């Protein structure tokens, strides 16, 4: 069949067959021809012809090829004389389009916005400082390579701000700084001492808890830090490549001042694109920009950032708008005109976004200060403004990402492959196309995922994400394929190119069962490209790509001339013919998905995780840090005597006894916003003879500033058992009082020192459950061959059954594994890296802050069991909490929840709790009781509770009966399953109240009830059936009733907080 062409002309139709002359002449508006619909098959036959017309092409058409080549290759692209067989040819070719400080303003460059901005900043600065933690995340990384004596590379450390302040007094010109959000806390204390004309450029790139590279502007504490700069400092935000240069040109072109320039360079500004090198400009920087505000009643507000753009990209809900500011000095009049509404109309609600409530409140103060200073009409009403915790669109609404225009090609390559960037530069030369390239390194896969997006020039193809759905998936590294699910982002009907030394017969054998199933399910076309390694390989790869791009069996004369011009007339005929002969389509339609052997499981491959920076020298691991090391006692002495210098303020753990950040606090290095509270009561609720220890824990929060909302959870940062830690130290040959120094997880480049006992008790999850990686690591350490082989077997796919038995039946811990394989004996320094930190355990708060004041009350059941070998096992955190006596200190943090009260106090609440799942509902009851004492009218509370025995496990029974007697609880359904032979559960109690439940659920306005279920997962289907039954008995069809409950979920009126085997999740 004839190849198809997707035209880019605004007046052209959709797909249509392209004749030979169209392809041969390669018209400018030929557009995107990846042909994912499968209507053509660009495979190579035995013919070695280069063009479809061959050498018989009419001479009169030569001017067309020359014109296309001229249009495709930008006139400012410097000529490259070396041969493709010369060392450094491809890197020099790419570098010729990159900017340097010597680049003239207005020059077209092919690079990322960050690359261009770095060169621009160096060019227009007297001195440039580059901090090491900025270089680690690829910000300022090229600056040192400019070989300028004005560039100074410095380290992020204590006193960094003072050093900068001292230098600023000695210079009269513009001082530029490249730093990251990790540098900011080191600079903050000294910003008021810095003088002169200075721009501190801050990269927002950081790493998350999984060590993936992410945007950190909306990380806890960052926005609060930015809003607390000393007087005289401006804050300016930049996002995309073009916008970064436009903003940067004005930042560097205005009168001398002190500026913090926040660059959200996690995605858009890192993409290689066509840019014009800027010049400094005078003029105002726009401060307020809004979208979709006309007729909306909800407005999401934040600083220019990846988050705000992603919210727009995710598809705003109906009647929702977006408002972003570029500075902390937004135009009051523009805010007022955008948000004020006439009297009588519904007021807009502005949600000010922040990573924590403290961050959102800080930005809210900036917003309100500007809004209230506007000179508006008294006939208009101001919006309602609230702080909202959000770090991604899903925190606000269900995202609805739309398909983006154009074609997307994902290359999975070795770290040093230049082909994706060569193709990007080739297509960037076309004025009719909008071309961008994003590259994501992976230290785990030791490769690079390069995503090339090509669209018509008048189309915006948006930010390129690491998991962007792809029209073509191209793999040229077998090692990457071995560990990575390369098809997870492949579109239906897309193309897979395997540039591997496989025969057609081997493809179906070498691909996994899951990969074959995905190819069949998504109807993916599979091509083999078997090219010989050599210096001209990148050229041959470009030829193969252009064959797919044009939907051709052979490279047309016009396209060949374009590629030849790009390589300075050095594309040889034999290289074109080699690529044509090597590209073969495999008949995947005839493949069968292999049957999985009984009892066997297939190891799932990992999706691509961006955790490293790609570079021309390969993948740079941003997680390379100093290794832990044993230390002398003098370092601990310095920690104690110089608390202020060594404390970690980001941890926000306050020791109220001494008033300084607690160096010896319970968890000084945790990244959460934590509080040090005191146990005031620990009371067992179930009888001592009962087999379940359910206890009431009360924590005194006086003086800590801890506040919480109804339904929120508290994170307990628990410790390992003291005696078990001491026993382990004695067996392992460790001195508990010896010291270990290890990288501080909050401050890159700094170290933390703890005793071995502190480390094993408070930091290292020694008695947690190990994963396969731990066994694999020990296999390399074991000195006995039998131990090494067994450990390696457990970590391999073949050992899945043994691993599962040890994990689920024996429930072995890290300590158990070390004891079992005694010749695998890592040092204490190595253990810090091999065993993860203890994670906080979260418990629903069983109290109302307004009702109880400076207290947090918890309802907890001790988790314990006996494993398959008869050994007792304990839940780490519940064991820790059960042993706490009044007066003990505990480190805690607050976690938001969807278990929130209805917006209208008069709306009915239906609560269903099993066991300790009653915790959040006790808080609901307390709050409604408190509201009554304040004269607030409240709606009815319906309470269903289930446990085994009324006499043993009627949790807070006396309180519940008092609430029933006083009318706080208007109806209760209590189910104690073991008190009778009938085994009555809460769903049975609910089924007995069908008429009442149907009326409440179908209510409108203030009569519309909210339903909540908290506890284990097993009753969820039965509870659902009970609710459906109540609606069907009231006249609904079953399907209609099920859809009605789904609508309740969407409205957040049907909320489940359920947990399986100790893991709690929120389902709405």
Image (cartoon, rainbow, N blue to C red):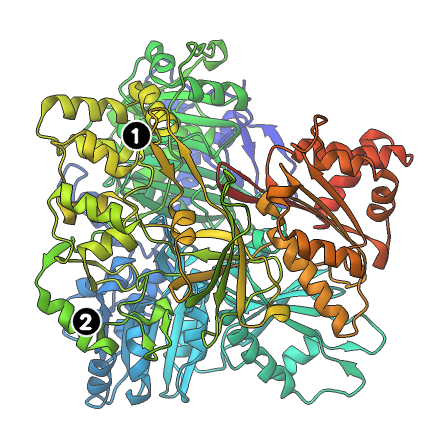
Quarter occupied by residue 48: top left
Q: Is residue 494 left or right of residue 276?
A: right
| Residue contact at pointers 1 and 2, CB within 8 angstroms | no
309 vs 33: above or below: below
How far across and how far down the image is residue 34, in percent?
48, 32
**Circle 1: element type:** loop
618 vs 799: above or below: below
Q: Dot 1, crowdedness within 10 Å: few (<14), some or many (≥20)?
A: many
Which sits earlier in the primary sequence, circle 1 or circle 2? 1
**Circle 2: element type:** helix
Quarter occupied by residue 958: bottom right
* Distance from Cα at disc 1 to Cα at disc 2: 51 Å
Q: Nearer the viewer, mark 1 or mark 2?
A: 2
Query: For this rendering, which residue is in front, 582 or 159?
Result: 159
Residue receiving disc 1: 476
How far across and how far down the image is residue 763, in percent?
28, 53
Q: Is residue 401 visible?
A: no
Q: Is residue 895 visible?
A: yes
Residue 981, numbered circle:
none
Q: Is residue 15 left or right of residue 216?
A: right
Q: Dot 2, crowdedness within 10 Å: few (<14), some or many (≥20)?
A: some
Number of numbered markers: 2
User: What residue do we see at 43% from left, 29% from top?
Assistant: 548
How far across and how far down the image is residue 95, in percent?
24, 53
**Looking at the image, which residue sits at the far front?**
689
Residue 639, numbered circle:
2
**Looking at the image, which residue sits at the far right?**
1035
Quarter occupied by residue 502: top left
């Amino acid at each position: 069949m004839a190849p198809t062409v997707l035209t880019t002309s605004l007046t052209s139709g959709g797909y249509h067959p392209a004749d030979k002359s169209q392809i041969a002449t390669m018209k400018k508006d030929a557009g995107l021809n990846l042909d994912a619909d499968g209507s053509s098959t660009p495979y190579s036959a035995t013919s070695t012809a280069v063009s479809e017309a061959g050498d018989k092409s009419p001479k009169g058409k030569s001017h067309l090829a020359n014109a296309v080549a001229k249009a495709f290759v930008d006139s400012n692209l410097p000529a490259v004389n070396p041969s493709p067989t010369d060392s450094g040819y491809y890197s020099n070719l790419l570098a010729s389009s990159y900017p340097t400080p010597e680049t003239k303003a207005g020059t077209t460059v092919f690079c990322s916005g960050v690359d261009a901005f770095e060169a621009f900043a160096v060019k227009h600065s007297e001195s440039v400082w580059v901090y090491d933690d900025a270089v680690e995340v690829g910000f300022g990384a090229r600056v040192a390579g400019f070989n300028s004596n004005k560039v100074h590379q410095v380290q992020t450390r204590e006193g960094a701000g003072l050093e900068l302040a001292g230098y600023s007094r000695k210079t009269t010109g513009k001082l530029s700084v490249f730093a990251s959000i990790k540098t900011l806390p080191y600079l903050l204390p000294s910003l008021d001492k810095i003088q002169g004309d200075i721009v501190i450029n801050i990269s927002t790139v950081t790493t998350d808890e999984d060590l993936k590279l992410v945007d950190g502007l909306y990380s806890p504490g960052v926005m609060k830090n930015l809003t607390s700069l000393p007087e005289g400092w401006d804050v300016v935000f930049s996002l995309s490549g073009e916008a970064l240069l436009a903003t940067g040109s004005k930042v560097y072109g205005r009168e001398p001042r002190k500026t913090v320039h926040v660059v959200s360079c996690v995605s858009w500004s890192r993409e290689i694109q066509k840019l014009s090198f800027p010049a400094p400009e005078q003029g105002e920087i726009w401060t307020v920009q809004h979208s979709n505000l006309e007729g909306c009643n909800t407005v999401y507000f934040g600083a220019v950032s990846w988050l705000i753009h992603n919210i727009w990209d995710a598809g705003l809900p109906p009647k929702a708008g977006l408002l972003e500011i570029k500075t902390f000095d937004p135009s009051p009049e523009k805010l007022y005109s955008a948000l004020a509404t006439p009297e009588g109309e519904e007021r807009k609600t502005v949600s000010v976004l922040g990573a924590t409530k403290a961050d959102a409140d800080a930005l809210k103060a900036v917003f309100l200060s500007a809004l209230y200073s506007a000179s508006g009409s008294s006939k208009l009403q101001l919006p309602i403004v609230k702080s909202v915790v959000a770090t991604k669109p899903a925190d606000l609404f269900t995202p609805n990402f739309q398909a983006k225009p154009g074609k997307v090609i994902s290359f999975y390559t070795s770290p040093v492959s230049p082909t994706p960037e060569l193709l990007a530069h080739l297509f960037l030369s076309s004025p009719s196309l909008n071309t961008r390239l994003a590259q994501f390194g992976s230290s785990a896969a030791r490769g690079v995922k390069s995503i090339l997006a090509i669209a018509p020039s008048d189309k915006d193809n948006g930010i390129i994400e690491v998991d962007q759905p792809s029209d073509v998936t191209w793999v040229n590294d077998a090692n990457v394929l071995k560990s990575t699910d390369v098809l997870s982002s492949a579109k239906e009907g897309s193309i897979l190119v395997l540039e591997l030394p496989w025969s057609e017969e081997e493809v179906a054998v070498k691909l996994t069962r899951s990969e074959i199933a995905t190819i069949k399910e998504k109807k993916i076309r599979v091509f083999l490209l078997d090219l010989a390694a050599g210096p001209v390989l990148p050229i041959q790869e470009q030829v193969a790509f252009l064959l797919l791009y044009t939907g051709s069996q052979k490279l047309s004369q016009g396209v060949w001339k374009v590629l030849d011009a790009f390589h300075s007339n050095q594309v040889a005929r034999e290289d074109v013919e080699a690529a044509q002969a090597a590209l073969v389509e495999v008949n995947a339609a005839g493949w069968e998905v292999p049957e999985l052997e009984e009892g066997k499981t297939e190891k799932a491959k990992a999706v691509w995780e961006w955790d490293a920076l790609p570079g021309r020298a390969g993948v740079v691991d941003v997680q390379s840090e100093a290794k832990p090391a044993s230390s002398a006692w003098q370092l601990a002495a310095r920690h104690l005597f110089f608390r202020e210098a060594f404390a970690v303020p980001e941890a926000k753990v306050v020791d109220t006894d001494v008033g300084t950040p607690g160096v010896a606090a319970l968890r000084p290095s945790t990244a959460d916003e934590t509080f040090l509270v005191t146990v005031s009561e620990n009371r067992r609720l179930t009888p001592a003879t009962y087999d379940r220890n359910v206890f009431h824990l009360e924590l005194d929060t006086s003086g800590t500033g801890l506040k919480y909302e109804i339904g929120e959870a508290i994170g307990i940062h628990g410790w390992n058992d003291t005696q078990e830690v001491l026993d382990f130290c004695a067996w392992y040959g460790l001195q508990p009082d010896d010291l270990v120094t290890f990288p501080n997880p909050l401050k890159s480049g700094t170290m933390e020192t703890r005793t071995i006992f502190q480390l094993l008790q408070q930091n290292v999850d020694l008695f947690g459950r190990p994963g396969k990686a731990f066994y694999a690591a020990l296999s390399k350490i074991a000195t006995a061959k039998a131990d090494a082989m067994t450990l390696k077997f457990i970590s391999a796919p073949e050992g899945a059954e043994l691993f599962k038995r040890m994990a689920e039946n024996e429930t072995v811990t890290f300590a158990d594994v070390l004891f079992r394989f005694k010749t695998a004996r890592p040092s204490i320094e190595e253990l810090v890296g091999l065993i993860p930190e203890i994670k906080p355990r979260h418990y629903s708060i069983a109290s109302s802050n307004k009702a109880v004041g400076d207290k947090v009350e918890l309802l907890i059941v001790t988790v314990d069991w006996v494993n398959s070998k008869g050994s007792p096992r304990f839940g780490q955190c519940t064991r820790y909490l059960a042993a706490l006596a009044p007066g003990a200190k505990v480190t805690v943090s607050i976690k938001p929840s969807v278990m929130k009260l209805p917006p209208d106090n008069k709306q009915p609440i239906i609560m269903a709790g099993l066991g300790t799942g009653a915790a959040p509902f006790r808080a609901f009851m307390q709050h409604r009781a408190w509201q009554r004492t304040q004269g607030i009218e409240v709606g009815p509370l319906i309470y269903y509770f289930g446990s085994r025995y009324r006499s043993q496990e009627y949790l807070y029974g006396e309180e519940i009966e008092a609430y029933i007697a006083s009318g706080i609880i208007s109806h209760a359904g209590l189910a104690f399953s073991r008190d009778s032979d009938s085994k009555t559960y809460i769903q049975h109690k609910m089924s007995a109240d069908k008429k009442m439940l149907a009326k409440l659920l179908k209510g409108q306005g203030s009569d519309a009830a909210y339903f909540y279920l908290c506890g284990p997962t097993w009753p969820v289907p039965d509870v659902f059936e009970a609710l459906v039954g109540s609606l069907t008995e009231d006249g609904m069809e079953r399907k209609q009733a099920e859809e009605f409950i789904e609508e309740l979920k969407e409205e957040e009126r049907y909320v489940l907080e359920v947990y399986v085997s100790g893991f709690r999740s929120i389902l709405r």
